[in-house]
Amino acid sequence: MSPIPITLTRHIIQTQAAHPGATGEFSSLMAQIGLVGKMIASDLRRAGLINILGTTGATNVQGETVKKLDEISNDAFLKVFQYSGLVCALASEEMEKPVQLPENWPHGKYMLLFDPLDGSSNTDVNMPLGTIFSILKHDGKGLPLESELIRKGTQQVAAGYVMYGSSTMLVFTAGRGVHGFTLDPGIGEYYLSHENIQIPAKGQVYAANEGNTQKWPDGARKFLDYLKTKDKQTGRPYSARYSGCLVADVHRVLLGGGLYLYPAEVDKPEGKLRLLYEANPLAMVVEQAGGKASTGTMRILDVEPKSLHQRVPLLIGSKNDVALAEDFILGRK
Ligand code: AFP
């Protein structure tokens, strides 16, 4: 008889068992994140049939047009967590302020920050999408203030993403390695399919919106030229692979090596991506897999955040590739 595949819940309970004092709250929290992933995956699979493509007509705190699926995905988090008793704060890319949880309702010690649907420009063209989450612990009494969610990435207790591609995968770390689970839609269960993921030290692909290179500082442009220059010994030129979805591009380099870069621009030194619920969680995952995540000049996880929707330049992936990019950006190459 073939071995029973390891489910997400069993994996978390097994790893939690190694931790005296574990209350099971974390495994419940992760199981609920898995549920949100299933709800969103189910909607995405039928999106073209149930009139949920297109926009809502509203604009979010980022100044972006809100897609119906952005709203539906954000609501899935609220429905699952608002009265779950597992969290004491919820903050999202789609909401200007954290959700005000009811004072008189039981709440847990975890604070959950998330990008409910990453890669929104892909929703109506059936291209890959993702959900990104970052988990912090609230040590204080009562409900936290917004300022208590604004913390360095090194303080995350866990982080990860759900990728909606040819299959739906949940990939996360709780600080003890990175594990990937594939959803079996027939059973509605996540099974361990990628245990202890290790990212190669160097890759052969890069993901970047090259339409922006004219806006990049010299160092970043020289780095891209370097990647495109033929040189057998260093495995160049690298191949360009850009999907419009950060989760999909990071997932590719996590498994195959290489890097994703959305560097600072001359007129936009803060870059595009959001620090607290895009860059920090993916940086924790990639570092736990042996990779590197940088702003171009410093480690993402060491960036001292100042606001909930703060943006940051992001270079993330294989440690040798990201280190080399830093050398170019810092003018050392
Ligand atoms: P959303 O998170 O707003 O959907 O944006 C997508 C994203 O944050 C990331 O997933 C992409 O890699 C990047 O922005 C795409 O940006 P460009 O359209 O400027 O290339």
Image: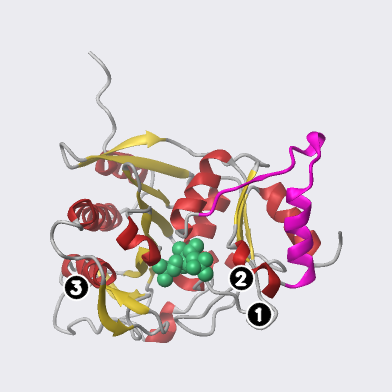
Amino acid type of the residue that numbered disc 2 sits on in the rendered structure? Pro
Gap between marks 2 and 1 measured at Cα = 7 Å
Q: Quadrant of residue 145?
A: bottom left
The answer to whether residue 156 of the structure is visible from this angle is no
**In this view, the mark in front (2 or 3):** 2
Q: Residue furthest right?
A: 332
What residue sits right under mark 1 in the picture?
Answer: 269
Residue numbers of the magenta segment: 217-242
Secondary structure under tag 2 reads loop
Whether 280 is drawn above or below 290: the answer is: below
| Mark 1: few/some/many CA within 10 Å (<14, 14-19, 20+) | some
Question: Does the residue at mark 2 contact the one at mark 1 (Cβ under 8 Å)?
Answer: yes
Residue drawn where x is 61% and y is 71% of the image: 313
Question: Does the residue at mark 1 contact the one at mark 3 (Cβ under 8 Å)?
Answer: no
Nearer-N-terminus badge (1/3): 3
**In this view, the mark in front (1 or 3):** 1
Gap between marks 1 and 3 measured at Cα = 36 Å
Nearer-N-terminus badge (2/3): 3
What residue sits right under mark 3 in the picture?
Answer: 82
Amino acid type of the residue that numbered disc 1 sits on in the rendered structure? Pro
Amino acid type of the residue that numbered disc 3 sits on in the rendered structure? Gln
Q: Is 259 contained in the magenta span? A: no
Viewer-closest of 114 and 9: 114
